[in-house]
Image (cartoon, rainbow, N blue to C red):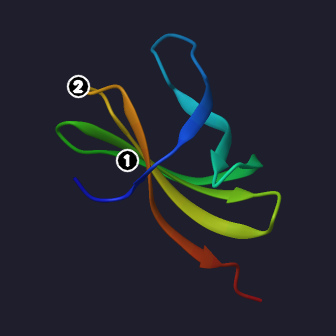
């Protein structure tokens, strides 16, 4: 398993964990300000988001394990 387990508050509409609204990393809560992209793999849904700290996070939700992970973090360019 890659990534760092995190706690996510997600919007659930027509399906569970449709998109992340906020997440907690190392006891720090971040609000999702924008979703850049969403894609799916056989067992995971991925979300590339901009948070309120102006960084880009790639989050994933493992549907089978019901587990959220932070896959990557990078600085916003420009």
Which residue is labeled 2 in the image? Answer: 64
Residue 59 against residue 19 in the figure, above or below? below
As measured in the structure, the alpha-carbon distance from the residue carrying label 1 to the one carrying label 2 is: 16 Å
In the orientation shown, which residue stands out farthest toward the top? 14
Q: Is mark 2 on a helix, strand or loop?
A: loop
Which mark is drawn over residue 39? 1
Residue at horizontal 74 percent and vertical 57 percent from the top? 51
Q: Where is residue 57 in the image (x, y as percent from the top left)?
A: 57, 62
Residue neighbourhood size for the residue with mark 2, other residues' Cα within 10 Å, grouped as few (<14), some (14–19), many (≥20): few
Above or below — where is 12 with respect to 3? above
Residue at 77% x, 89% y: name it: 78
Q: Find residue 46 and report its horizontal and vertical position in percent.
A: 40, 47
Q: Earlier in the sequence, mark 1 or mark 2?
A: 1
Residue 15 falls left or right of residue 27: left
The extreme bottom residue here reads: 78
Q: In this view, does 49 lie to the left or right of 38?
A: right
* Residue 20: quarter of image: top right
What residue sits 59% from the left and 77% below the top?
74
Position in image of residue 73 (x %, y %): 55, 70
Label 1 crowd bin: few (<14), some (14–19), many (20+), radius 10 Å: few
Give 64 or 41, whichever is nearer the viewer: 64
Q: What element carries label 1?
A: strand
At 72% across and 51% down in the image, what residue appears?
34
């Amino acid at each position: 398993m890659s990534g760092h387990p995190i706690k996510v508050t997600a919007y659930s509409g027509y399906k569970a964990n449709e998109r992340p609204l906020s997440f907690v990393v190392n006891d720090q809560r971040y609000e999702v300000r924008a979703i850049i992209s969403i894609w799916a793999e056989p067992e995971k849904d991925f979300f590339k988001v901009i948070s309120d700290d102006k960084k880009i996070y790639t989050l994933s939700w493992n549907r089978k394990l019901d587990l959220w992970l932070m896959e990557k973090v990078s600085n916003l360019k420009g």
